[in-house]
Amino acid sequence: MSNIVIVFDFDKTIIDCDSDDWVIDQFGFTDFFNHLLPTTPLNSLMERMMMEFHSHGKSIEDIEKVLHRIPINQRIISAIKSAHALGCDLRIVSDSNTFFIETFLKHLGISECFSEINTNPGYVNQEGRLRILPHHDFNKASHGCPLCPPNMCKGLIIDRIQSSILEGDNNKRFIYLGDGIGDYCPSLRLKERDFMMPRKNFPAWDLICKDPSLLKAEIHGWSDGEELEQVLMKLISKIMIEENVQFISSGCKLQSLSIPVHQPPKIIHLTMLGI
């Protein structure tokens, strides 16, 4: 097991669309959704949409079939499988919901690559209707973060993950991948030895570009699945090389490493792209 924790957003990061929009568009409810969106919090609106689906005869199986058709770049699947095979701890932090995410990951056969999914609860009730609830019950109390939507603060989730992981091991390194406004808050929680991978020309990227100095983590942008895989694998390699160098300096035998002593690896110096 490596010391690398990789946190993925789901919408427009793992998949190449917004899962809420995808399901609504596929069922032909776009106009109804857009009519209510200006006056209804998104999480509450998705609960309302599930009620509409059910009343119009859309079954859970219909929803699953639509989710199975969500587009994804094959290079992202490859990156996830490679990172998992290298012993990285993969997690998801998303404002989607458990039903959408788990259904999609199981369909692709990659659900076992992730140790944890942090998102809004989604489950099928006794009536056979999909329920979508807020991760944070904003009707009871606010989570207190002005940067995030009322139902979820991803920054607080990252705080919890960091506390639980770093409590017994300060050598853990984080890589965070995301695209949206909600991914900006967690980027501010990353440490100096961590890495932020915002999707270029998406809201998180735009916010970071306004003042990159606010982030302690190194920033490495990506634009599509191919570049995501390239940048992510280079960062994993960079961290593993640094870990091996530290391992050598601690007095451990060189023979225990896979890197030849007579041919030291080249450390790839990555720079913040586009800033």
Image (cartoon, rainbow, N blue to C red):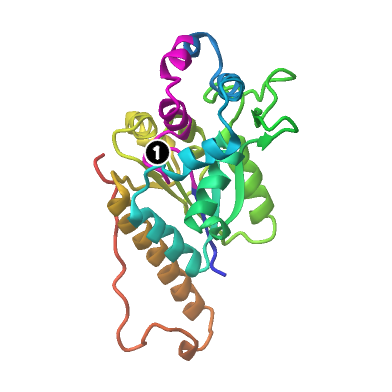
x, y percent for residue 55: 61, 20
Write down the quadrant of residue 53 in the picture: top right
Q: Which residues are magenta?
A: 8-35
Query: Which residue is at a point 39% across and 33% down the rendered structure image?
Result: 204
Q: Does residue 98 appear left or right of residue 33 in this picture?
A: right
x, y percent for residue 16: 36, 41
Q: Is residue 182 magenta?
A: no
Front-lying residue, 246 or 22? 22
Front-lying residue, 8 or 33? 33
Front-lying residue, 258 or 122? 122
Q: Identify the image quadrant of the N terminus.
A: bottom right
x, y percent for residue 227: 28, 52
Instruction: Name the kind of residue labelled 1 in the image.
Output: Lys
On the image, numbered disc 1 is attached to which residue?
Answer: 12
Query: Which residue is at a point 34% across and 50% down the rendered structure image?
Result: 73
Q: Secondary structure at mark 1?
A: loop
Answer yes or no: is residue 149 visible.
Answer: yes
Q: Does residue 252 appear left or right of residue 30 in this picture?
A: right
Query: Which residue is at a point 56% across and 21% down the rendered structure image?
Result: 56
Most distant residue in the front direction: 57
Q: Is residue 13 magenta?
A: yes
x, y percent for residue 164: 68, 51
Q: Does residue 24 appear left or right of residue 56 in this picture?
A: left
